[in-house]
Structure formats: C-alpha cells, structure tokens
Image (cartoon, grey):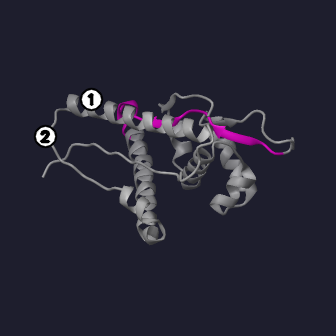
C-alpha cells in the first residue's frame, strides 16, 4: 500500500463514490490483493473488465485507489493499489445538513449489510474450514454502561490493537511467512442503545 495512513472521507462526492455495491467489492478485493489489474479484479467480482475499469477510475478520481508503479511489463495494463491503509467516515463530518447526514447513513448501512453478508457467507461455508480455523473464529457481543468519552477511548484502543495485528501479519507475509495464512475479517461496532 502506498501509505499506512487511513483515508478520512470528509466530502460528499467521495462518500457517493464509495456508496456503490460494485465499488465496495472492488475495493475489498484490491485491498486483499494489494495490487491488481482491472482484468484480475473483474475475474474476482464476475463483471466485465470495461465496467470494472470504469469503477476503478472513479475510485482513483477520489483518491481511494491509485496506480501501482513498477508492476507488469505490459503498458496496456494498469496496476492499481489502495491509496491508504484503510477508509474511515465520521458522523461529525456529515451532520451539517440533512442531505449529508442521510447519505452518510445510507452508505454506512450499505457497508453494514456487506459486512453481514461476508459473515453469513462464512457461516454457510463453515463446514469447509478446518477445525483450527473454526475454533479461532469468533462472534461476540458485550453490553456495558459507558460514557461517550469512555466509548471513544475504547474505540481508539481497539483500532490500535487491530492495526497492530494487521501490520504484524503483513510484515510476516512480506517476509515469506505465508504457510497457513488466510484473509481474516474483523468487524467492530460500538454504539449506544436504549431499551
């Protein structure tokens, strides 16, 4: 990846660009691959190369992905990579107008549905995974009385923990330690609720 910094999405145009089901899939596939061409990604998402190329260019226009230098010998093929180590949106950046807030909620809901679908796919295919992977996988929920400040601190600690594991895993992979490694998704939510 080009940078270890998370891309903080603050503008409506970029948020709109991210709010497309195919772009969600393409970004995830590219993030997992590290670098890829439109042809490679088209195979993964089962779409036409021309359509994938169009959506990749849209993501690039908004700084979400970028061309990867030094890949491939064929000048006709563009290699792409994520422009940052991740994407983030904050409610505070979109609550100034009802339209902005509504769009942020809509896009957030799309990502929540995509994450749920990923977990449901794992559940459907769980029997195909070895027992060590099944034993390591987890789903957990905890409810506790916190202040907004405490929830914010917990968020920062959890993000740092996950970031540390991501960097550790990537360093091991880059050093050639690939035996037994699989892509792992970790989703975290923390939000207030009332009964």
Cα separation, mark 1 vs mark 2, equals 14 Å
Sequence-wise, the earlier of marks 1 and 2 is 2
Is residue 137 visible in this depiction of the protein?
no
| First to last magenta residue range | 77-98
The residue that disc 2 covers is 145
Which percent across, then down, holds residue 108?
Answer: 41, 47
The label number, if any, that marks residue 102 in the structure image = none
Q: Is residue 83 magenta?
A: yes
Under circle 1, the secondary element is helix
Q: Residue at x 51, y 40 (%)?
A: 169
Q: Nearer the viewer, residue 94 or 76?
A: 76
Q: Is residue 93 magenta?
A: yes
Q: Nearer the viewer, residue 110 or 84?
A: 84
In the picture, residue 83 is in which quadrant?
A: top right
Quarter of the picture containing the N terminus is top right
Q: Nearer the viewer, residue 11 or 144?
A: 144
Residue 65 left/right relative to 143:
right
Q: Residue at x 18, y 47 (%)?
A: 143
Residue 173 left/right relative to 53:
left
Residue 73 left/right relative to 128:
right
Which percent across, then down, holds residue 163?
Answer: 44, 35
Is residue 42 shown above or below 158? below
The residue that disc 1 covers is 153
Disc 1 packing (10 Å; few <14; some 14–19; many ≥20): few
Under circle 2, the secondary element is loop
Is residue 72 shown above or below 46? above
């Amino acid at each position: 990846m080009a940078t270890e910094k998370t891309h903080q999405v603050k503008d409506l145009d970029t948020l709109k660009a991210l709010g497309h089901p195919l772009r969600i899939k393409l970004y995830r596939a590219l993030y997992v691959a590290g670098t890829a061409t439109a042809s490679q990604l088209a195979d993964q998402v089962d779409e036409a190369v021309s359509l994938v190329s169009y959506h990749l260019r849209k993501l690039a226009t908004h700084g979400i992905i970028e061309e990867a230098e030094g890949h491939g010998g064929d000048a006709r093929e563009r290699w792409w990579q994520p422009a940052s180590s991740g994407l983030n949106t904050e409610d505070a950046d979109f609550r100034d107008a009802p339209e902005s807030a509504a769009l942020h909620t809509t896009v957030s809901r799309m990502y929540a549905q995509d994450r749920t679908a990923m977990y449901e796919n794992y559940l459907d295919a769980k029997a195909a995974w070895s027992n060590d992977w099944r034993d390591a996988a987890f789903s957990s929920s905890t409810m506790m009385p916190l202040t907004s400040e405490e929830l914010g601190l917990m968020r920062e600690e959890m993000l740092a923990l996950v970031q540390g594991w991501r960097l550790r895993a990537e360093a091991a992979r880059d050093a050639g330690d690939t035996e037994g490694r699989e892509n792992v998704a970790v989703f975290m939510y923390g939000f207030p609720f009332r009964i």
